[in-house]
Image (cartoon, rainbow, N blue to C red):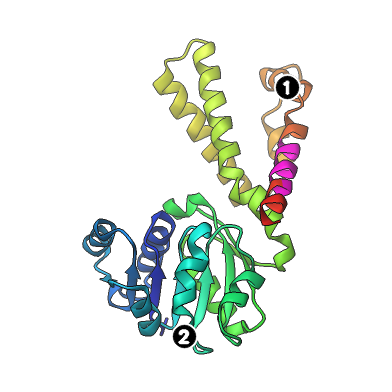
């Protein structure tokens, strides 16, 4: 990839992207730079990935064609406003700041600056994430391709109209927390039926991981895979009946709707 890549903010998600880009061989570390308010964090990133670290955000913008905004949403305007004179149509701004929409970003930046908004999720930290992208007014097909390649280094990407972003946030953004709750509950269930906790934890975690991989790699409908392990009068159908009686399916749906509604409220 023939661009220089800069990060304003060098937190966990920025590190996930830097690691993914390097692992995928998209560019060498000499073409990646980052700034951050914490010098110790920058030193760690330099030692771990051999990237260039910069003392100020303006240098990141001046030295890179692609700039990733990996900062907390509550400080985005404060951080971005002084940098406005440095941005131009030759840049691509990729924002992973949660809840900040394209209109907000474009309202801060000068007219003509291409912006892509991204909603990633935390499994990007282990290269198993998924990201949704929305294009700003001045983002072209080429900008879309660049963003998709970069985010694709840590998992699948989808480019969607921005109107879908609250739903994406509720499903894949918040979704890992739902799965963690399931893993925790399955582990506790194992303990309840007599298993040592450490063994129950591995059994629960690997079962969730393996089941997800079965859906992904076989491309079969989850219902079909469920039926494959459900014998008439057996143990699995007894467990499934208990789950259905407890409303687990509707509860998961309601959780996503509640998270979507809360995303809308936070957006105002």
Give the image location of residue 202, x and y in percent. 44, 29
Placement of the C terminus among the 4 image quadrants: bottom right
Q: Indicate the secondary structure of the residue bearing disc 2.
A: helix
Closer to the camera, 162 or 55?
55
Label at residue 85: 2
Give the image location of residue 51, x and y in percent. 27, 70
Q: Earlier in the sequence, mark 2 or mark 1?
A: 2
- Report the magenta stretch's main SS: helix
Label at residue 237: 1
The answer to whether the residue labelled 2 contacts the one labelled 1, judged by CB atoms less than 8 Å apart, is: no
Q: Indicate the secondary structure of the residue bearing disc 1.
A: helix
* Residue 184 seen in the current view: yes
Placement of the N terminus among the 4 image quadrants: bottom left
Label at residue 28: none
Magenta residue span: 252-261
Give the image location of residue 45, x and y in percent. 28, 61
Q: Is residue 221 above or below residue 6?
A: above
Q: Residue at x 49, y 74 (%)?
A: 81
Q: Residue at x 61, y 82 (%)?
A: 139
Please give left or right for residue 221 compared with residue 133 in the image: right
């Amino acid at each position: 990839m023939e661009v220089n890549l800069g990060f304003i903010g060098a937190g966990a998600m920025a590190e996930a992207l830097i690691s993914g880009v390097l692992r995928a061989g998209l560019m060498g570390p000499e073409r990646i730079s980052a700034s951050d308010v914490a010098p110790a964090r920058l030193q760690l990133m330099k030692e771990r990935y051999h990237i260039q670290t910069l003392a100020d955000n303006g240098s990141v913008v001046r030295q890179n064609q692609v700039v990733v905004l990996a900062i907390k949403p509550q400080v985005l305007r404060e951080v971005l406003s002084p940098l406005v004179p440095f941005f131009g149509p030759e840049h691509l701004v990729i924002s992973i700041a949660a809840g900040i929409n394209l209109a907000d970003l474009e309202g801060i930046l000068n007219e003509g600056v291409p912006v892509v908004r991204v909603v990633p999720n935390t499994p990007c930290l282990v290269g198993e994430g998924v990201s949704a992208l929305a294009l700003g007014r001045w983002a072209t097909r080429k900008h879309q391709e660049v963003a998709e390649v970069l985010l694709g280094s840590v998992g699948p990407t989808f480019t969607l109209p921005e109107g879908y972003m609250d739903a994406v946030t509720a499903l894949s953004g918040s979704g890992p927390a739902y799965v963690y709750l399931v893993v925790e509950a399955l582990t506790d269930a194992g303990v309840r039926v007599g298993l040592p906790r450490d063994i129950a934890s591995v059994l629960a975690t690997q079962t969730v991981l393996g089941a997800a991989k079965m859906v992904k790699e076989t491309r079969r409908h989850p219902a079909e895979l469920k039926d494959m392990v459900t014998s008439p009068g057996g143990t699995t159908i007894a467990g499934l009946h208990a789950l259905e009686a407890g409303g687990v399916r509707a509860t998961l749906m309601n959780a996503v709707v509640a998270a979507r509604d809360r995303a809308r409220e936070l957006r105002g």
